[in-house]
Image (cartoon, grey):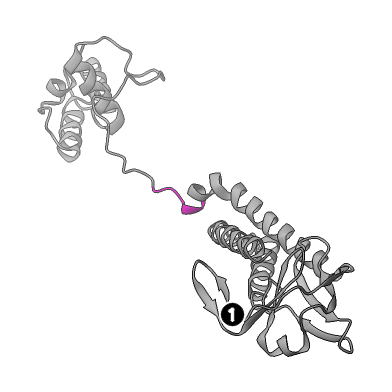
Amino acid sequence: MKDFYQILGVNQQASDTEIKKAFRRLATVHHPDKSENENANAIFQEINEAYQVLGNPERRQLYDYLIRHQLEAWLFEEQPAPPRPYQSYTPPVRQNPAELYKPYLKFALWATRGALLVCLVILLDIVLPYRIRTETIQAIPLENELRLFGGYESASTSLLVTENETLPISRDDEAGFSDGNQIMIYKTPILNSFIKVVNLDNQMYKAGASYNIYTVFVFMPIILTITSLIGTFYQKDTEFTLKIGIANFTFSLLTIYFIVLIN
């Protein structure tokens, strides 16, 4: 393999500027039109060949690689370059947060659809005709306290005890009922939530449920409806869709919990 550095009279650490200056100097001296040496043409071609390699950064890098590894190759033909002796450091590419959320997006969408389904069930439950049945009050306890949530007592709630169930009403409505009264109980058709009770023996005296998902806890289905509608119709932002899906899942569980607890 020809030593192009020696031909141009420079060392392997020579800069591009030094190589260029050396080529111009030698080309001027050995140009066939100016030199009287009979070998001037061959020398000039050799100088030009050396510069074609060393004057091109990519060819020079390849040439240096071949010299270091003592390999034979064609320097002037277009061919796949051998592996570079070193790899430049490539900083890791930061992944778009939206790409990180994509695997969980389908679960968020299913949570939103589930929340919307819960809202639909609640809506049908309140608009469909109520289930009505007649029972007799067997007792109204003197201790008019209803225990909720593992020990919380509400002195504002009274109980109407019938043969089949206990109905919570407001303590203010207790005066309209007494033991032995015939009452009509209204409940929703799907969730069986107690809505109201009518006293048939006391001029049709009525009392609403003191608490249920449609009274005290009505804020839960309202919030769930709003968040589920937002999650259903606004899905432009992947991160927002994921967060609203988590919110819908949480509110759905809370709503179902209150329904089961109260019923």
- In percent of the image, x 11 and y 28: which residue is there? 10
Q: Main secondary structure of the magenta part?
A: loop
Which amino acid type is shown beneath numbered disc 1?
Glu
* Boundaries of the magenta span: 94-98
Quadrant in which the C terminus appears: bottom right
Q: Give the labeled residue for mark 1.
A: 143
> Going by the image, does 52 lie left or right of 122?
left
**Magenta segment includes 95:** yes
**Residue 30 vertical placement versus 193 (above, below):** above
Front one among 201 and 260? 201
Residue 39 appearing in the image? no
* Label 1 secondary element: loop
Residue 162's image quarter?
bottom right
**Magenta segment includes 44:** no
Quadrant in which the N terminus appears: top left
**Residue 186 vertical placement versus 51 (above, below):** below
Residue 168 x %, y %:
69, 75
Residue 205 appearing in the image? yes
**Residue 230 vertical placement versus 49 (above, below):** below
Front one among 169 and 130? 169
Residue 251 x %, y %:
59, 64
> Going by the image, does 145 lie left or right of 189?
left
**Residue 133 vertical placement versus 178 (above, below):** above
Residue 128's image quarter?
bottom right
Front one among 48 and 236? 236
Residue 186 x %, y %:
83, 72
